[in-house]
Image (cartoon, coloured by chain):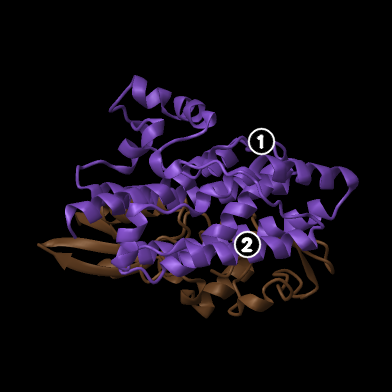
Amino acid sequence: MNSESQKYLFEYCLRIGDTNMILAQRLGEWCGHGPILEEDIALTNISLDLLGQAREFLTYAGQVEGKGRSEDDLAYFRGEREFRNFLISEQPNGDFGQTILRQFLVSTFQYYFFEALKKSNDKTISALSEKSMKEVTYHLRHCSEWVKRLGDGTEESHQRMVSAINELWMYTGDIFEMNEADKVLIKEGIAVDLSPIKSLWENKVKDVFSQATLSVPENVFMILGSNEGKHTEHLGHMLAEMQSLTRAFPGATW
Amino acid sequence: MVWDLLRQIPDPEIPVITISDLGVLRDVSMENGKIVVTITPTYSGCPAMKAIELDILSVLRENGIDAKIKTVYSPAWTTDWMSDEAKEKLRVYGISPPIRNPKSEIRNIVCPRCNSSNSELISQFGSTACKALYRCKDCREPFDYFKCH
């Protein structure tokens, strides 16, 4: 692999690892605050799965980069502009409905994405995708059921889901953005074209929304930028909290 | 000999089954005069994997063997690797074992206490990431189900 492809592969792994790590952090905020015990456990279990996947992808990213950076180095010592997580992952949790909706939208993407990425020519990416798929299948099942129950629930739960859709929809375009890295890696059979994934995602979302008596928004202006490290205001605050201890005591161990 | 030592190591969370029953222990080999134990993680975020690694290293060290652990992700771990004996051990312990056909998973989970299949799902996520929470509608007891993976 030439050094340009290597750089692109590093970026590609960061997108997956960073998105999962930031989402895991958001879901972790629910620990002890879930609306019912079973959901407290469910959200934190999903968080744990995502964190495990993040560790695997960030570790691999460090290996691909070849500069000796470990998963911890990447997690704790990069600034916002170096993070490649989807913008939707750093959005605040909001209420339970908004958290569930965010997870549903991302898990639907990951389901079709990892399914396709299993066929990657890169053996590690292929293995990690196959593994992640199994876990994402449960995340998707859990969240789509809740979207239906909340959407087709009470007047209040329905309203809250409508507000959640209005809050989050503008960040869904960012998920499917591709750049030069994608072009090069797709040619090498390592990455996947996100256009067919987007169609699958749209169909699934439409299907679940219609069962939930919710409407899919149209003509929404999309906020983009995660591929270039251009994030919304929230990421900086999250990283400050996540990184303050390690930055204050670099090299410290338990 | 090393294999015999390792295949008795119990799972830290579910001590009635061993890491060999689970399919976590994959291989033992020799590389440059050093023992290499190959394991594969169950769930990506499973926190018990760290405990399993430490158990492997300490059991071997107690027997004077210095070893290295190698983690592989492929082939992806699946509950299909669990033996029927291991599944029975789970059931006796009170955990409903994974069934083979995931499509019927939501409906036919059998209560490990009274054997009724009249059960209902409470949550896809139970006491650990690998288990779901069910309730038996006949004997009215809740129970964990080891999810098909």
Do we see residue B86 in this rendering? yes
Q: Position of residue A188 (x, y in %)?
A: 28, 66
Q: Quadrant of residue A77?
A: top left
Q: Which residue is mark 2?
A: A202
SS label for mark 1: loop
Labels 1, 2: one chain:
yes
Q: Residue at x 50, y 54 (%)?
A: A176
Judge whether B71 appears above or below B74 on screen: above
Q: Is residue A79 left or right of residue B92?
A: left
Q: CA distance from mark 1 to mark 2?
A: 33 Å
Callout in the foreground (1, 2): 2
Instruction: Determine the residue located farthest toward the front in the rendered image.
Output: A219
Q: Quadrant of residue B93?
A: bottom right
Is residue B123 or residue A115 the one in the foreground? A115
Q: Residue at x 56, y 74 (%)?
A: B87
Q: Position of residue B42 (x, y in %)?
A: 46, 62
Chain letter, colour brown in render:
B
